Image (cartoon, rainbow, N blue to C red):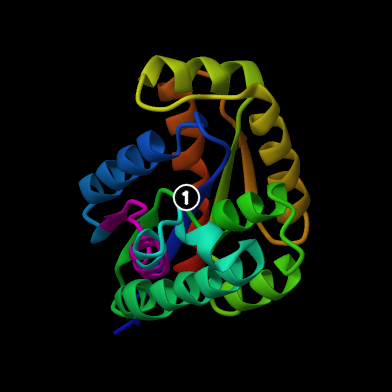
């Protein structure tokens, strides 16, 4: 019997790119095809949870401020690696497809925007075993991203921040395998393009 092969699919992109929406749609489509699929949304990491509590005990605003950006990013990178090694790969080893709405690329790009001097160390740790089998970059224009974020009404958007974040993400992904998909189109057309990319990847895994 042919060995089942799972896959880790990760989305990345700036705020408003549609990562969570497309990750959920992809999971639904894969499940309809009879494939065992798990959807992972980003949760607060162990590092962020613990450092936040410790920071408050010292009257400091955040865990990042308590540790400083350099130490925080290195610690966070170990957390990101642990998530892939212990929370994702055991499922893909069983033939399950794991779809993540965010990847280490998102966090690393954020560190680059904040001028983290230890970003090369953080990248080496987080991506040591943490690169998805298929990384989908939803590359959306700044204007569209800004409009979507503002429409959500749950957070604020800053065009300059989105611009810096997209630039950092582009520079980061340049050195790693990924598929870029334009994110300005309708949800349905983006969904179809993603399905095509994933179908091709699945066929590769099956040796077709």
Picture residue at 38% right of the left edge, 63% below the top: 45
Please state the total of marks drawn on the protein image: 1
Establish if 44 lies above or below 30: below
For residue 122, what is the image quadrant? bottom right
**Residue 158 placement: quadrant:** top right
Q: Where 97 falls versus 168 (above or below)? A: below
Could one spot residue 207 in this view of the protein? no
- Residue at the extreme front: 59
Q: Does 205 sit left or right of 68 as displayed?
A: left
Q: Residue at (44%, 41%) from the top-left corner?
A: 195
Secondary structure at badge 1 equals helix
139 vs 206, left or right, is: right
Q: Is residue 104 left or right of residue 39?
A: right
What residue is at 41 percent from the left and 57 percent from the top? 59
Image location of residue 61, percent across then percent down: 45, 51
Position of residue 58 measured from the top left corner of the image (x, y, whole percent): 41, 64
The picture places residue 153, in percent across and down from the top left corner, at: 36, 19
Q: Which residue is mark 1?
A: 198
* Span highlighted in magenta in the image: 38-53
Q: Is residue 44 magenta?
A: yes
Asked if the stretch drawn in magenta spans residue 160, the answer is no
Name the quadrant of the N terminus.
bottom left
Identify the residue at image location x=38%, y=43%: 23
Q: Position of residue 6 (x, y in %)?
A: 37, 70
Mark 1 residue crowding within 10 angstroms, few (<14) / some (14–19) / many (20+):
some
């Amino acid at each position: 019997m042919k060995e089942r092969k799972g896959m880790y699919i990760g989305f990345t992109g700036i705020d408003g790119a549609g990562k969570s929406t497309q990750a959920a749609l992809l999971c639904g489509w894969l499940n309809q095809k009879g494939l065992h699929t798990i959807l992972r949304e980003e949760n607060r990491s162990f590092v962020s949870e613990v450092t936040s509590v410790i920071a408050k005990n010292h009257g400091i605003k955040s865990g990042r401020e308590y540790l400083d950006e350099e130490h925080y990013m290195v610690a966070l990178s170990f957390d990101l690696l642990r998530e892939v090694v212990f929370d994702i790969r055991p499922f893909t080893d069983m033939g399950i497809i794991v779809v993540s709405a965010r990847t280490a690329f998102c966090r690393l790009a954020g560190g680059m925007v904040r001028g983290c001097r230890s970003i090369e160390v953080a990248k080496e740790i987080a991506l040591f075993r943490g690169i998805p089998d298929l990384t989908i970059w939803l590359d959306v224009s700044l204007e569209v991203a800004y409009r979507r974020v503002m429409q959500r009404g749950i957070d604020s958007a800053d065009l300059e921040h989105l611009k810096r974040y997209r630039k950092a993400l582009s520079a980061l992904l340049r050195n790693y395998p990924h598929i870029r998909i334009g994110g300005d189109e309708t949800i349905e057309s983006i969904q179809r393009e993603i399905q095509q990319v994933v179908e091709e990847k699945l066929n590769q895994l099956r040796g077709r």
